Image (tube, grey):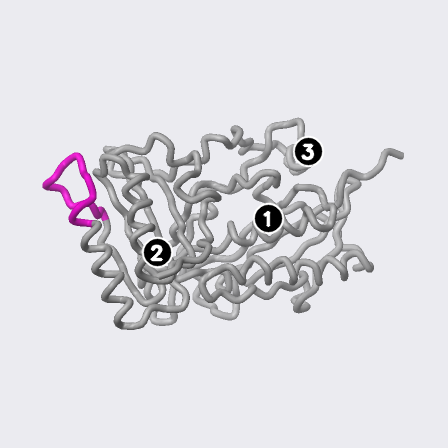
Amino acid sequence: MAQGSIYQTPRGGLAHPVFEGAGPTDQLGATFAFWPALDDAQLVEAQQVLNHWSERAERVEPDEPVHCDEPFLSPRALRVRVHTLAHPREAVSALLASLGQAVPVREAHFARYLFTDDGQEPAVIRDPTAPPALTHFPRHENYLAAVFDPASPPPASEYESQVRGALETRSGDIVLEDRGPPLHLPPLRIGYGTARAAFTPPDARAHHLAQALAGALARTFESLAGAAPPPFSDHLGTPGAVDRVSVADRVGYGFAFASPQLAQRLTQTRFRYREPELFDALGALVAQEGLAPIVTWQRFGKPFAKDRTVVAMHVFQLWEPEAPAR
């Protein structure tokens, strides 16, 4: 089967530096999304590819199963988490290549986890090319300085305590979040924590950016496995609008997405948020519109809230270049 381009996270897929040096003590997680969704015959083909690979993958302990989680295969996705592989990057690459010859793989999402003996959940390994991130700030002004000063160490792009989440389905089941490496997507400077900015009346620039944002989202999401561009709104809930904000002599633009609309369901018990995809769209928008390569963002809401009228939100802010000196 001819295989088109595959949208991969992290950028470059298994060629990303985070997978260099991976060995048998590491766990590798991989999710492959199919589009169009597989029919019954294709499901059988995908299962056969997986079975053949699982039996033949080279492992350092031949009596150990290659899978540390039970693989999950559906018409829309295959999720595996593997260990004990002698050469895990090469082995998982071979699995992707074999699947791509048999069925329409449209997306591939990977993560590397470091196994520990303390009984804790294996930790996701961060991008080795990412600089050390600041995580503590005495005041909000110090955080803003770290965000806006390209010469200083950047603030953390995410905090594990705030971005490892779960969803509760209407039936009461808990669906856990799968995350890849912490966000590091140069040239963007990503700071976790929205600026405490003042809202100012939208102007022509804000209205133009709203339209440009819709276009950037559409272009990015057309590459994905049947995913529609997520709708966004301003702080008043106006569909397709962005806020104009200002803080510390900076002009910016804010907008929000309902978090459930960003969720990609992987299995009956796992999901992921399409955050890298959003940042790819925002990076393209920044370059196109001459904005500063800075994004501040934050998740709001409680994933286990029983009141279903309260929807968790992803909020983002983009910024104009530095204000001219007075």
Magenta region includes residue 7: no
Number of residues whose C-alpha sits closer than 10 Å to that of mark 1, classed few (under 14), some (14–19) or many (20 or more): many
Q: Which residue is mark 1?
A: 297
Cα gap from disc 2 to disc 3, whole angstroms: 46 Å
Residue 217 image position (x, y, % from top left)? 60, 59
> Cα distance, mark 1 to mark 3?
16 Å
Q: CA distance from mark 1 to mark 2?
A: 35 Å
Residue on which disc 3 sits? 145
Q: Residues within 10 Å of mark 2 (few under 14, many from 20)?
A: many
Q: Which mark is residue 266?
A: none
Residue linked to disc 2: 100
Q: Amino acid at mark 3?
A: Ala
Q: Residue at x 27, y 59 (%)?
A: 72
Outermost residue, right side? 326
The earlier-in-sequence mark between 1 and 2 is 2
Q: Determine whether, in the image, residue 243 is placed left or right of residue 226.
A: right
Residue 174 visible, this angle:
no
Task: Find residue 317 and report its horizontal and vertical position in percent.
Answer: 66, 50
Q: Which element type, helix, strand or loop, lies under badge 1?
A: strand
Confirm whether the magenta stretch covers residue 62. Answer: yes
Residue type at tag 2:
Gly
Disc 2 + disc 3, Cβ < 8 Å: no
| Amino acid at pointer 1 | Trp
**Along the polypeptide, which appears first: circle 1 or circle 3?**
3
